[in-house]
Image: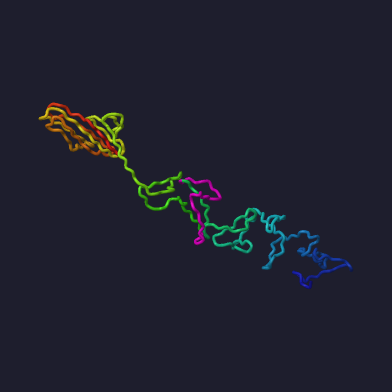
Amino acid sequence: NGNTLPGFPKQVQFLGPGSTFNLSNGMPLWNGATVYPIPILTTPYNHNPQSIAGSLSMTGYNLYNVGHLGVGTSLPAWGIDVEGLGAAGTINANQGYKVNGGAGAAGQALCSDGVYLDRFCSFLSATNFYYQTLNANGAPMTQRPVANFSSRFALTDDNSPLQTNIDLGASGATAGSYTSANITVDAYGRVTSAANGSVTISVVQKSCLGGSAVCAGTSTGYISGTTYTNSSGVPVQEEVGITSTGVCTGSDSEINFVVNGIAGYGNGVYNQCSGKAGVTFIVPAGETFSVTATQIDGGGSTSITSWLELSL
């Protein structure tokens, strides 16, 4: 094509008029030798493969219209097929990658649609990527691709900043303060309804002197001089009365009580042919108490004739 071949001019000779010389096999020198290497042909015979025994530099020119480019393979199956071993099977891109000419947004990474790695997905931030696990009371749960929150939680999307908000779902109860509230609690311990209510105080009265009533001292028949413990869990009021009989002059009797080891103010019948007296006291929950009826002097007798116990 009128261009000087590298390493030439040289003296060559073409012998035999009408002969055909294939210059792709080398240039025939004047001394009958053939000059190698054989040049790479733009259109080899029958499109046969060619090879070179050295590096190929394009000196900044483009290489284009390539069918498949194989690295480490003579049968490339993709546009660029890298199947070398070790470092020869690695693609190094100092500036990164683009898909369809785009790089996605900050904080996104290349992910799969099930066929190709060809789309961008959002993660936590542009510089820190985490695959967080979930713990239940400090014990790690099995990793799953989705963290699903039940209907007892409310999830909302927030566009500014980009985040998903997780909050407790509405319980059905109105926030506020209630008096003597009537409440409903679901299986998860949540208050689902609340309303103002009223307190009904009911006083329970028992006769603890005899009969079958079980009183705070876990006894069905209190007697004089015995110490009992209020095991009811609430304070109780004891109302105890005595009846005294005897001579009309000089006949004295008394009734006394002790709560948790401390004697209270007693009462009595003095210089009467017959009479009645009583004491009333409160016993806090868990404390001990006793009542003693005593004939002090003179003839006659003194006995506890009534013992009522009141509690809420």
Near-viewer residue (22 or 156): 156
The magenta segment: 137-162
Whether residue 109 is situated above or below residue 291 in the rendered picture? below
- Residue 274: x, y in percent? 15, 30
User: Is residue 131 toward the left or the right of residue 307 in the image?
Assistant: right
The quadrant of the picture occupied by the C terminus is top left
User: Is residue 182 toward the left or the right of residue 111 in the image?
Assistant: left
Whether residue 225 is situated above or below residue 80 in the rendered picture? above
What residue sits 37% from the left and 52% below the top? Answer: 177
Q: Can you name the residue that lies furthest to the left here? A: 249
Near-viewer residue (123 or 283): 283
- Residue 5: x, y in percent? 76, 70
Q: Can you name the residue that lies furthest to the bottom here? A: 2
- Residue 111: x, y in percent? 60, 56
- Residue 163: x, y in percent? 50, 58
Q: Quadrant of residue 207?
A: top left
Q: Can you name the residue that lies furthest to the top here? A: 299
What residue sits 14% from the left and 27% below the top? Answer: 246
User: Is residue 123 toward the left or the right of residue 116 in the image?
Assistant: left
Q: Quadrant of residue 210?
A: top left
The quadrant of the picture occupied by the N terminus is bottom right
